[in-house]
Amino acid sequence: MNKRMFPDLKVFFFFPSLLFLLAVSSITTYGQSGNQASSYNIMDSSVIPAKRMPQQNEFLNNAYPFPAKPRNAWELGIKGGYTTGITDVRNWGPTGGFGVHLRKAFGYMFSLRAEYDWLRLRGLNYQPTQAYGRNPVLSSYYGSGGVPNAPFVFNNYRSTVHELSLQGVFTINNINFHRAKTGWNMYFFGGPGLATYSTFMKTVNSSGTPYNYASIITKYNNNFTYKNRKDIRSDLKNLLTGDWSTMAERSNNNATLGGAPIMLVGVVGMGFQFKLNNKWNIAVEDKFTFTNSDLIDGQQWQNNYSPNAVQSIAQTRSADSYNFLSVGINYNLFTKHAVEPLWWINPLDYAYSEINAPRHMKLPKPVLDDADGDGVTDQFDMEPNTPKGSPVDSHGVSRDTDGDGVPDFKDKELVTPTQCQPVDADGVGKCPDPQCCKDLKNYIDNMGGNLGRKCNIGDLPSINFKGRSVSLNNDAKALLASAADKMRNNPGCKVAVIGYGESSKAAQQLSWDRVNAVINYLVEKEGIGADRLIFRYGQVGGEESTVDLKDGTGEEGPNTVPAPHPNLRRKK
C-alpha cells in the first residue's frame, strides 16, 4: 500500500502551546487598552487623503453621517521558523526558512500581503524501495532495477524552495463591541503564488561510490531486528555522510527560471499578532502551501516493501506540499499623516465614544414640559397651575412682592407697607393714622370734647419672660387678670400689646410669639374682645424680655398679625 509521509504530530501540539503563552503575555500587557481612546482623532482631517476630503467635509458639516476612511500605514515584516515537507519521502529532522512581506489594509477586516519565502526541505525514508529503476537519476547509479533480488535504496532529498505569493488576509477580532481596541489580532490568509525549487539527493559517498545499503537491508529483513523507525534512520544518517551532490529528477512540463522549474502554488494559513506599541508587533503563524508538482522530493515512484512478499511499484501521482511555522516581527511604514494599519483599529470606537461624550453629534434642543407656561419646567415647578401671565419666582410660585399673602397677579396694591397689613382679598391694607393725627385725637379725648371719649384705664402692667421662653408663668397670669378687670371696667378703652426686638429675624419672631401669647390669654382666658387689643411686635425702645400693655384708645392697628418668620417659632 502506498503511504504519504506526514510530519510528526508533536509539531502541531507545540504551535498552539506557543500561541497560548504569547496570547497570555499580550493580554497582560495590553489588558487596559480597552479603556483608551481610538488611535486617531476622527476630527483630524490631516490623516484624510485628498480624494476623500469631500466626504470628510460633509461629515464635519453634519451633512453626511460617516467620516472618511483615513490613510493608514503599511506593514513590513520578517519571519523565520520551522519547515516541514509533506511528500513521498519522510521529513528528515528540523529544517528552516525565512520570509519577508509587505502588507496594506483595504478595510478594517481585509488586507493584501505580498510575501517572499526561502524554505529548506529535507527528507529520509526509513522504508527501503526497489522503485529507483523508474527514477532516471537513481537508475543511472543503481541500474535499471525494479525486479526481485535487485539492490534496495532508501530515498532521501534536500530541496530549496523560493516562493512568491499574493495573499488576502482577513482579520476577525478588531471589530469589538466592548472595548476600544485590542492588543492582539487573529487572522486567516490565502492566495495564489509561484515557486521554484532545486532538489538534490545523496547517492554517492565522499569517494564517489554509490551507497551500499546491504547491511541495513539485512537488519531490516532479519525478522524486523529494528525495534523502531528511529533506529533505522539513525543507521541511515551514519551511512549518508557525503554531500548533497546529485540533482534530483525535474519535470519537463514546467516553465523554468534559471533552469529551476516554476510551479503554481496556493497558500492558506492562520496567524496571531501581538502588539508591542503603535509601530511594532510580533506574529506567530502557520502557512500551508499546495503545489502542482510531485518532484519537490525528487521522487514520484514508490513501493511498499516487506520481506518475503511480492513488491508492488506504483507512481504516487500526488502533488507535494509543505508547511512553514514561523515567528516574525513587523514594523509599520509610512506613518506620517497616517494612522496605524486598519486591522488594529476598532471602527465602532468612534460611534461609542460619540454616544458617551458627544463632540460632533448635532443634538436637538431638549423639549421639557411646562403645563402652565410660566417658564419653569414641570419637574421643578412647585405651583403647577399658575394662571397664565402671572409672574413667578424660580420655583414657579406666583410672586408676592410685599409678602401680604395676596399674589401679585391679584394684588391691587402691589407694595403694601408692613404696618398696613393685614390686607383684604384684593391685597389692599388699612394703614394706621399718622402720629400727628393720633396726637390730635388723644388731645381731643383728654380735653373731653365731643369728638372723642377719654379713657381713664390708668396704668397697665408689663409682662416679663425669662430667657427665650414664650410661656406665661403664674405671676404673669395674675398681672393679666388685673389688666383684664380694668378693661372690663373701662369698656371704651383699647389696649396696645407691645413687644420689642427688631435686631434679627429670631428677635422679631420671639417678640411676635410673646405678644401673641399675651393677647391669646386675654381673649381666651379672660374673655376680652379681640377688637379691643392692638398687636404690635418688633418695636424699639424697650426690653426684649418685656411685653408692655398700654392705653391704645384712639389708635388703629390689627389685633392679629401673621408670624413674620414661622420657621423660627418657639414652642411653649
Image: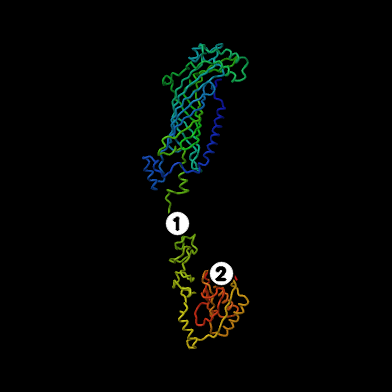
Residue 157: x percent and y percent?
51, 19
> Which of 561 and 323 lies nearest the eye of the viewer?
561
Query: On screen, 7 above or below 383?
Result: above
Residue 238: x percent and y percent?
56, 16
Which comes before the other along the chain, label 1 or label 2? Answer: 1
Label 2 crowd (10 A; few <14 / some 14-19 / many >=20): some
Are dots 1 and 2 in contact, CB under 8 Å? no
47 on left or right of 543: left
Residue sitting at x 56%, y 32% = 17
Query: Which label was assigned to residue 114?
Result: none
What's under tag 1, amino acid-wise?
A: Val
What's under tag 2, amino acid-wise?
A: Arg
Q: Is residue 192 visible?
A: no
The quadrant in which the C terminus is found is bottom right
Query: On screen, 452 above or below 372?
Result: below
Residue sitting at x 47%, y 84% = 441
Toward which corner of the image does residue 511 lie, by quadrant? bottom right
The quadrant in which the N terminus is found is top right
Toward which corner of the image does residue 168 lie, by quadrant? top left
184 on left or right of 219: left
* Residue bearing the label numbered 2: 569
Query: On screen, 1 above or below 358?
Result: above
SS of the residue under disc 1 = loop
> Which of 124 and 73 lies nearest the eye of the viewer?
73
Query: Which label was assigned to residue 367?
Result: 1
> Which of 466 and 234 lies nearest the eye of the viewer?
466
Toward which corner of the image does residue 74 lie, by quadrant? top left
Q: Distance between the residues labelled 1 and 2?
A: 43 Å
Residue 261: x percent and y percent?
44, 21
